């Protein structure tokens, strides 16, 4: 696996420490906010108003309104009843997993709890009795529905899955869970870190789609530090669930995200800049899709900016043509490396033309 160092944040391009310049088609800054000028102005204003960080519990006697404002606007953006801002997407997942059994017992008198971990589910959702699953997602979800419908009403079920597969991109059909009976005590926990800001209307994410599934308790969590550019995480759920999470010692004892970034999140939502950048990203995806030939070079899904390949030669071919993607083992060091090409809202048509040309060349030489 090749490792490159740089002293500058990549944007459309990246300059390595060896002073080589490449077109940059990697990372998770899908909306290109690492170099967005409006975002920087909002951050400057936030730092002036709230300082560099807030060294306190969210449950302290003195509470900053920046968090309340961001949560209210974000729940409206996603369509969720309630939102909680925390320090990272990883902590959003682990906070939920540490409290999930308390949540289950507060709603029912379940005697047993059974976990259902999806194939390749992100470590943020690894909790009690976790074990890797080797089935396909569809085989796994079919089996989960069968097991839940066949179980006694005294058993509660916790389903943990990503919204979109990563690192190998994959689309999942959540309508399978509509088959579950409302009489079952079932919780669906979804990590949408690689979907929020991209999927859904204007990038609002998966909540509105999942909300059509009745009869299950839903918790959606995500990193904000991918498409949305905010170093923090969020938990979306109903008011009762999130109210209980706010009383958790795992919430009270954890440092919150920097309030200056909550101001940025508020301003990005109020000015609809996320919507504007989402539109630019969708246009870039559509343009690139027109340029690349049909075939099996990539694993990809509709209206999504990530193009994956298990062919390690593709990464080297791109490098030879001054394009840097990514190719590394994730999340375990023993996992097979996946080459991921990522289109962002920052890219210009000439960048996409170059990428398509180099990919066509690879196909012709293969």
Image (cartoon, rainbow, N blue to C red):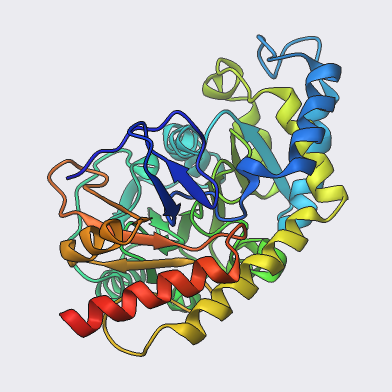
User: Which image quarter holds the N terminus?
Assistant: top left
Q: Residue 16: percent from the left, percent from the top?
A: 38, 37
Q: Is residue 40 left or right of residue 251?
A: right
Please indicate, yes or no, whether residue 98 appears anywhere in the rendered image. Answer: yes
In the image, residue 206 sits, relative to residue 75, either above or below, namely: below
Q: Residue 341: percent from the left, percent from the top?
A: 38, 62
Quadrant in the rendering for residue 159: bottom left
In the image, residue 101 sits, relative to residue 24, either above or below, namely: above
Front position in the image: 286 or 52: 286
Please indicate, yes or no, whether residue 172 appears anywhere in the rendered image. Answer: no
Q: Residue furthest front?
A: 19
In the image, residue 353 sits, relative to residue 242, either above or below, namely: below
In the image, residue 85 sits, relative to residue 290, either above or below, namely: above
Q: Is residue 246 left or right of residue 335?
A: right
> Which residue does the image show at 39% across and 77% down from the upper left?
357
Quadrant in the rendering for residue 6: top left
User: Which image quarter holds the C terminus?
Assistant: bottom left
Q: Is residue 265 left or right of residue 309?
A: right
Q: Residue 278: percent from the left, percent from the top?
A: 68, 63
> Which residue does the image show at 50% across and 63% down from the upper left?
343
Front position in the image: 306 or 353: 353
Front position in the image: 272 or 161: 272
> Which residue does the image show at 69% across and 19% down from the upper left?
58
> Which residue does the image show at 33% across and 47% down from the upper left?
112
Q: Residue 38: percent from the left, percent from the top?
A: 79, 42
Q: Residue furthest left?
A: 334
Front position in the image: 178 or 326: 326
């Amino acid at each position: 696996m090749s490792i490159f160092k740089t002293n500058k944040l990549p944007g459309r391009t990246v300059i390595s420490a060896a002073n080589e310049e490449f077109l940059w088609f990697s990372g998770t800054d899908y909306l290109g906010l690492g170099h967005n000028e409006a975002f920087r102005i909002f951050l400057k204003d936030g730092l002036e108003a709230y300082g560099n960080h807030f060294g306190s519990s969210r449950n302290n006697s003195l509470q900053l309104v920046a968090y309340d404002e961001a949560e209210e606007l974000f729940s409206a953006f996603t369509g969720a009843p309630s939102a909680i801002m925390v320090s990272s997407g990883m902590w959003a997942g682990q906070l939920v997993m540490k409290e999930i059994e308390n949540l289950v017992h507060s709603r029912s008198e379940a005697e047993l709890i059974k976990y259902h971990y999806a194939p390749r589910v992100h470590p943020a959702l690894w909790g009690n009795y976790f074990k890797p699953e080797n089935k396909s997602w569809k085989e796994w979800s079919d089996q989960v529905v069968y097991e839940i419908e066949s179980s006694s009403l005294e058993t509660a079920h916790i389903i943990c899955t990503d919204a979109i597969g990563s690192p190998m991109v994959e689309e999942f059909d959540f309508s399978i869970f509509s088959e579950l009976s409302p009489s079952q005590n079932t919780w669906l926990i979804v990590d949408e870190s690689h979907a929020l800001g991209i999927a859904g209307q204007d990038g609002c994410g998966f909540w509105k789609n999942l909300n059509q599934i009745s009869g299950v308790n839903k918790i959606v969590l995500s990193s904000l530090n991918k498409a949305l550019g905010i170093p923090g995480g969020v938990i979306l759920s109903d008011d009762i669930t999130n109210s209980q999470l706010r009383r958790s010692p795992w919430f009270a004892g954890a440092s919150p995200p920097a309030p200056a970034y909550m101001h940025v999140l508020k301003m990005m939502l109020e000015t609809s800049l996320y919507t504007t950048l989402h539109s630019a990203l969708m246009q870039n995806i559509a343009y690139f899709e027109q340029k690349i030939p049909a075939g099996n070079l990539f694993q990809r899904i509709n209206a999504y900016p990530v193009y994956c390949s298990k062919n390690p030669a593709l990464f080297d071919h791109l490098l030879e043509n001054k394009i840097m993607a990514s190719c590394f083992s994730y999340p375990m060091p023993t996992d097979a490396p996946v080459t991921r090409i990522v289109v962002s809202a920052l890219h210009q048509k000439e960048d996409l033309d170059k990428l398509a040309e180099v990919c066509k060349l690879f196909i012709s030489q293969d």
